[in-house]
Image (tube, rainbow, N blue to C red):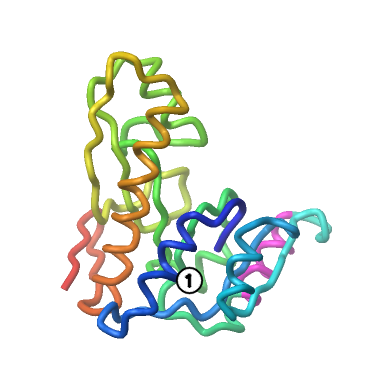
Amino acid sequence: MVSGTGSNLRALLEAHDDPAYGARVVGVVSDRPGIRALEIAREAGIPTAVVALRDFEDRAAWDRATAEAVGVFAPDLVVLAGFMKLFGPDFLARWGGRIVNTHPALLPSFPGAHGVRDALAYGVKVSGCTVIVVDEGVDSGPIVAQVAVPVEADDDEESLHERIKLVERALLVDVVGRIAREGMTVDGRQVRLG
């Protein structure tokens, strides 16, 4: 699932070309039409769907439609690759426990849309990225994996975010491949791969 430029999607598509990776991107769903991520999917021959919130009477109707759109592709795992909307109870009831997302901070610190900015404002010396299993909260799901990224003295939000994005893409690709090859078990807040 995508909302933007598709850098995470591109990384997953590059990995899925290797049969040993164990995972295939079977479809791409976006909440926004006309974005680069959809072009990347189409160029790779991956079917796409757009379920824009503005096309629905309310968020609950959008949530149900999004769950149905994802269902068309029959995925084993739903990967949020830069998807910027929260899901409601209908989506989570259908796909809960099988949705992973990345966040550009070391959760549980600095959740939300401005994790990098918030970490810098707090003065942390180490930031990073986290892959979580999505739950009903904002970046509050069980942690699957994390990678630390040092904060440099001259970092601003853009420079730190770019360095985090590099490790975030690699971490997402690694985690998705491991889930596909080894499986994932979630027991409360504990996540085990393999």
Residue 18 horizontal side relative to residue 46, left or right: left
Q: Position of residue 153 (x, y in %)?
A: 28, 14
Residue at the location (75% across, 59% down)?
33
In this view of the protein, which residue sits in the foreground, 107 or 155?
Answer: 155
Tell me the quarter of the image containing the C terminus. Answer: bottom left
Q: Position of residue 186 (x, y in %)?
A: 25, 65
Q: Which residues are magenta?
A: 59-69
Q: Position of residue 148 (x, y in %)?
A: 22, 38
User: Which element type, helix, strand or loop, lies under badge 1?
Assistant: helix
Q: Position of residue 157 (x, y in %)?
A: 45, 24
Residue at the location (68% across, 72% down)?
49
Q: Is residue 142 above or below residue 90?
A: above
Tell me the quarter of the image containing the N terminus. Answer: bottom right
Residue at the location (51% across, 69% down)?
93
The kind of residue tagged 1 is: Trp
In this view of the protein, which residue sits in the foreground, 88 or 36?
Answer: 36
In this view of the protein, which residue sits in the foreground, 146 or 156?
Answer: 156
The total number of labels drawn is 1
Residue 40 horizontal side relative to residue 19, left or right: right
Residue 109 horizontal side relative to residue 134, left or right: left
Q: Which residue is mark 1?
A: 95
Q: Is residue 33 above or below residue 165?
A: below
Mark 1: few/some/many CA within 10 Å (<14, 14-19, 20+): some
Residue at the location (60% across, 60% down)?
37
SS majority, magenta: helix
Q: Is residue 168 magenta?
A: no
